[in-house]
Image (cartoon, coloured by chain):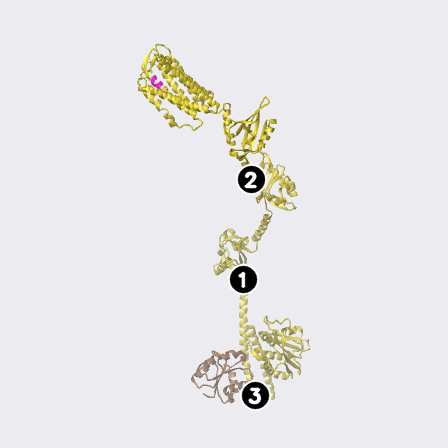
């Protein structure tokens, strides 16, 4: 106790040592919780040493001693807590890091005892001695409690550290733990000796016991060594090879010189389902599904240093078959085989990826082949490296094998264009940019050319150099032909001499051709979007459009005429043909109108119609005039004829023979005049269409008889005999009695006129079948003609007729003129009237003659 | 009713004269009219004739209309009406029949035949 040992200096040195250690530990890794906790622990020692360094100095005043006491006490009351924290951090490093809160709780007793120190309850206030100040324990329970806390924490900490270190397979970690534990134990033993045991034996509390923190330096040193020198907590291939091997993902087996498995790492153990620490030597062959695989490997192994086998299968957990590849490296020492390292790789996933890749490749190939375009890859020399199905099809080959490797430009491009096509390829090989798609002709197997449109990309190798081209092509031969045809159509429409308008479904103009502009004066832009109705002239018929729309919207063509107005206001007429345009589903999607300016035509037509109307009027006037004149002419004739009769009858007195002769001449001429007037009247009616007949069933024989009676006086004058030859005594037929009588009279009159005196005229009747009549070709019967007719013939022995005359004799006013003499008077109207009457009876009349001088036959037929 | 009276209606004086001569010896008195109006005036105010010889083409009312008028009047309808005209009988036929005329004939027939027709009309029993 009386010793003057410079204890304070020694404590000061230890303070410096602790501080340096703390700095080094932290510098090693400032982020690691282990290092932080270790540094805190060492710092607690440093505080303790600093406190003692101040106290154990006889020069220190009391107040400084009290401060030092309190300062140092923080260190020694809390260092068990720091120790426990540190050891716990080490032992839990592979598990989840500790939470902050439980760590803080560790410090509750430390802080509690520090407060006891501050209140002088654990130790009494410093007492002076020649060696400096020291603080004796109080007589209370607290020193004992403190010692209990101290021992409990240190032992617990040691327990955690030792159990962790001893269990640890990592030799470095084990070594570190053990070094720290030994350092700790050493300090505890020395500390206990100096602090507790020696004072108990010596009965005094001496210098040695005051040196306790010096012993702890060993502890701190061991910690610092372990943390700094061995770098426990930073992976390091040098000192962690075992750990690396153990924990690596690849499965590793170590075989001894007899090729028995002596070690397997965690991954291998998991893969094979063999416990990691399994002590018994395993037969290498037994890990294979097929034992022979392993045995063969072992047999071949000594001759090689490295042996790799893929595609084998090993037995996994519960003998599950696992596809694997295996590689074995022999370990030799002075040419002696000492063992082997075997790496197993589970290729299950790899196989899966390979299969997937293969599928993808097949799919890609399928895509390429089902693509609707020609896909072609050429290498840098222009040889085909890829061609799809469509490409083969277009070229006319059945398989791509026939094509691969062939020179594209020599074999599949027409000679004429080969150099131009190759130029594009050359440009691409120089990485020149080709704008847009390229078109060129290709040659099919059968020699025909197709026009293709290509999109090209340049393929480059890894060095970025030209490796070839990839092109996708489309056969545009037909499309181009269509385009050209379309262009022709478009030109035709554009240059059409007719106006062409195309409108949408709603009738709005979408297209007009230049002719439209020429005719109407409206430009395409002005017309577009408008309804063609905008052309309509103000006074045009509005109903036309209604009718037009009804027609074309029902899918039919409409034809008609429009009265339209040009841009300059002038009116024009157009004839239009408007049709719907159908799509492939037969639905209307547009309308097309083809129009023609018919203003001129229309004008002419109008003029024509006007003249026709005027003519009709003139004709009507003429007809009325004729009929009026006929009537007015007849009336005076009636008087003339009447008074002539009176004169001849002697009403006005007896006439001398000469007077009588003159009156007879007057009578004869007035009768001729009357018959002429009657004929004119009939003809005028026929022309006006008002000449009609009313048929009824009549016996024709009396009609003939009465006609003969009427004509008899004329016949008598020329001593002509009229003879009727009929197989019938009565013959009923549907006729207009009066008109047929007129026919007989006219025919007989005509024959009598031209017959020589004393000759005979025969009237014959006969039923005939239509085909036996011998109708001249110029006589046309109505379509609904019956099979049988009554044929009537008037046969005379007159001068006869030429063929031409026979045909023209029924024409109005036509007369067979004898150049020398015109023996007979006549109007030439009689036969024309006959023809008209017979036609109204649906019959026919004609004349025959065997020639001039041989008489004539006038025949007519009436339907039965 | 038997007034022994014949009316001739014709705008042609020559025709009237012709008829008058033709019918002189029938014992009938003959009166001439030149249009429908004159005839109507006479028919309404004087003695009725046994027969009217009626021309068709008359100024004003035509013969058919006059005939229809006479035949539709209960007081007049017993008068015999003979239509005659410069038209042919065929031309007259339709309208003459519908007008109710007792007979019709063309002026262009032989005078004897004409006289016969008239006389037959006056004395049907002959």
Tell us which disc is closer to us: 1 or 2.
2
Q: Secondary structure at mark 3?
A: helix
Mark 2 closeness class: few <14, some 14–19, many ≥20 residues within 10 Å: few
The residue singled out by tag 1 in the image is: A603
Q: Where's residue A160, x and y in %?
A: 42, 24
SS under mark 1? helix
Quadrant placement of the N terminus of chain A: top left
Quarter of the image where one finds residue A306: top right
The Cα atoms of the two marked residues, 2 and 3, are separated by 138 Å
Q: Which residues are magenta?
A: A68-74
Q: Is residue A230 above or below residue B96?
A: above
Decide: is B39 above or below A226: below
Chain ID of residue with mark 3 = A
Q: x, y (%) of residue A837?
A: 58, 75
Label 1 resides on the chain identified as A
Which one is closest to the eye, mark 2 or mark 3?
Answer: 2
In the image, what residue occupies the spot 54% across and 66% down?
A611
Q: CA distance from mark 1 to mark 3?
A: 68 Å
**Which class describes the residues within 10 Å of circle 3: few (<14), some (14-19), or many (20+)?**
few
Q: Callout 2: residue from which chain?
A: A
* Colour applied to chain A: yellow
Apparent side of residue A173 relative to residue A827 in the rendered image (left or right): left
Contact (Cβ within 8 Å) of mark 2 with mark 3 = no
From the viewer's perspective, tell me whether residue A714 is left or right of residue A561.
Answer: right
Q: Colour of chain B?
A: brown
Q: Give left or right: position of A324 versus A138.
A: right
Nearer to us in this view, A809 or A728? A728
In this figure, which residue is indicated by the disc labeled 3? Answer: A649
């Amino acid at each position: 106790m009386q010793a003057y040992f410079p204890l304070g200096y020694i404590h000061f040195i230890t303070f410096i040592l602790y501080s340096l250690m703390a700095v080094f530990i932290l510098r090693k890794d400032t982020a690691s919780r282990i290092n932080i906790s270790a540094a805190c622990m060492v710092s607690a020692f440093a505080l303790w040493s600093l406190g003692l360094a101040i106290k154990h100095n006889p020069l220190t005043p009391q107040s400084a001693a009290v401060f030092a006491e309190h300062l140092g006490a923080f260190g020694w009351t809390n260092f068990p807590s720091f120790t426990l924290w540190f050891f716990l951090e080490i032992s839990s490093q592979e598990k989840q890091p500790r939470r902050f809160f439980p760590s803080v709780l560790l410090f509750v007793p430390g802080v509690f005892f520090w407060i006891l120190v501050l209140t002088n309850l654990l130790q009494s206030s410093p007492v002076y001695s020649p060696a400096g100040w020291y603080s004796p324990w109080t007589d209370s329970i607290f020193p004992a409690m403190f010692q209990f806390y101290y021992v409990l924490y240190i032992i617990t900490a040691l327990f955690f550290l030792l159990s962790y270190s001893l269990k640890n397979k990592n030799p470095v970690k084990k070594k570190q733990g053990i070094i720290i534990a030994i350092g700790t134990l050493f300090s505890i033993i020395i500390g206990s000796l100096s602090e507790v045991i020696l004072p108990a034996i010596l009965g005094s509390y001496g210098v040695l016991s005051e040196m306790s923190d010096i012993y702890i330096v060993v502890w701190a040193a061991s910690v610092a060594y372990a943390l700094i020198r061995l770098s426990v907590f930073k992976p390091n291939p040098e000192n962690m090879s075992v750990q690396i091997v153990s924990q690596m993902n690849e499965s590793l087996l170590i075989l001894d010189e007899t090729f028995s498995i002596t070690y397997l790492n965690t991954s291998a153990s998991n893969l094979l389902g063999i416990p990691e620490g399994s002590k018994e030597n395993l037969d290498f062959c037994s890990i294979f599904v097929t034992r022979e695989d392993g045995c063969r490997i072992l047999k071949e192994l000594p001759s090689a240093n490295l042996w790799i086998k893929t595609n084998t299968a090993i037995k996994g957990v519960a003998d599950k078959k696992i596809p694997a590849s295996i590689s074995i490296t022999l370990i030799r020492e002075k040419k002696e085989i000492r063992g082997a390292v075997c790496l197993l790789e589970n290729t299950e996933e790899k196989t899966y990826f390979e299969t997937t890749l293969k599928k993808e490749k097949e799919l890609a190939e399928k895509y390429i082949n089902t693509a609707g375009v020609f896909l072609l890859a050429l290498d840098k020399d222009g040889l085909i490296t890829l061609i799809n199905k469509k490409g083969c099809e277009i070229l006319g080959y059945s398989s791509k094998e026939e094509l691969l490797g062939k020179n594209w430009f020599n074999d599949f491009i027409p000679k004429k264009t080969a150099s131009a096509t190759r130029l594009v390829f050359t440009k691409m090989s120089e990485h020149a940019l080709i704008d847009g798609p390229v078109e060129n002709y290709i040659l099919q197997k059968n020699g025909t050319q197709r026009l293709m449109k290509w999109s090209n990309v340049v393929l480059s190798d890894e060095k970025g150099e030209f490796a070839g081209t990839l092109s996708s092509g489309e056969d545009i031969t037909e499309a181009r032909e269509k385009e050209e045809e379309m262009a022709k159509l478009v030109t035709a429409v554009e240059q059409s001499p007719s106006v062409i308008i195309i409108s949408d479904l709603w009738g709005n103009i979408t297209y007009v051709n230049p002719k439209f502009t020429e005719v109407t004066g409206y430009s395409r832009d002005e017309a577009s979007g408008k309804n063609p109705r905008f052309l309509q002239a103000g006074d045009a018929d509005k109903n036309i459009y209604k009718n037009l729309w009804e027609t074309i919207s029902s899918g039919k063509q409409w034809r008609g005429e429009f009265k339209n107005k040009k841009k300059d206001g002038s009116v024009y007429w157009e004839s239009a043909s408007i049709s719907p345009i159908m799509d492939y589903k037969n639905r209307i999607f547009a309308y097309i109108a083809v129009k023609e300016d018919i203003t001129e035509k229309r004008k002419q037509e109008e003029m024509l119609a006007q003249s026709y109307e005027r003519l009709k009027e003139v004709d009507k006037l003429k007809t009325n005039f004729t009929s009026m004149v006929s009537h007015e002419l007849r009336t005076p004739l009636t008087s003339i004829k009447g008074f002539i009769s009176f004169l001849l009858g002697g009403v006005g007195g007896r006439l001398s023979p000469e007077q009588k002769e003159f009156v007879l001449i007057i009578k004869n001429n007035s009768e001729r005049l009357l018959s002429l007037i009657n004929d004119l009247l009939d003809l005028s009616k026929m022309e006006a269409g008002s000449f009609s007949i009313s048929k009824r069933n009549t016996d024709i024989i009396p009609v003939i008889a009465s006609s003969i009676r009427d004509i008899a006086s004329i016949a008598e004058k020329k001593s002509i005999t009229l003879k009727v030859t009929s197989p019938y005594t009565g013959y009923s037929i549907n006729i207009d009695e009066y008109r047929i009588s007129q026919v007989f009279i006219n025919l007989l009159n005509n024959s009598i006129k031209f017959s020589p005196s004393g000759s005979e005229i025969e009237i014959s009747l006969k039923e005939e079948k239509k085909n036996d009549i011998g109708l001249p070709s110029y006589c046309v019967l109505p379509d609904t003609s019956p099979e049988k007719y009554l044929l009537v013939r008037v046969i005379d022995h007159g001068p006869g007729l030429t063929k031409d005359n026979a045909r023209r004799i029924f024409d109005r006013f036509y007369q067979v003129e004898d150049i020398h003499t015109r023996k007979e008077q006549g109007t030439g109207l009689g036969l024309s009237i006959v023809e008209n009457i017979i036609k109204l009876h649906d019959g026919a009349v004609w004349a025959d003659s065997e020639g001039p001088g041989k008489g004539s036959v006038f025949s007519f037929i009436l339907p039965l | 009713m038997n007034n022994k009276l014949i009316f001739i209606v014709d705008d042609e004086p020559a025709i009237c004269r012709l008829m008058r001569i033709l019918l002189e010896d029938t014992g009938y008195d003959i009166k001439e009219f030149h249009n429908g109006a004159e005839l109507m005036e006479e028919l309404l105010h004087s003695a009725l004739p046994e027969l009217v010889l009626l021309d068709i083409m008359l100024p004003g009312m035509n013969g058919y209309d006059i005939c229809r008028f006479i035949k539709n009047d209960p007081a007049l309808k017993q008068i015999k009406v003979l239509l005659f005209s410069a038209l042919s009988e065929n031309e007259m036929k339709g309208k003459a029949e519908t007008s109710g005329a007792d007979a019709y004939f063309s002026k262009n027939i032989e005078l004897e035949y004409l006289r016969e027709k008239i006389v037959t009309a006056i004395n049907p029993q002959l």
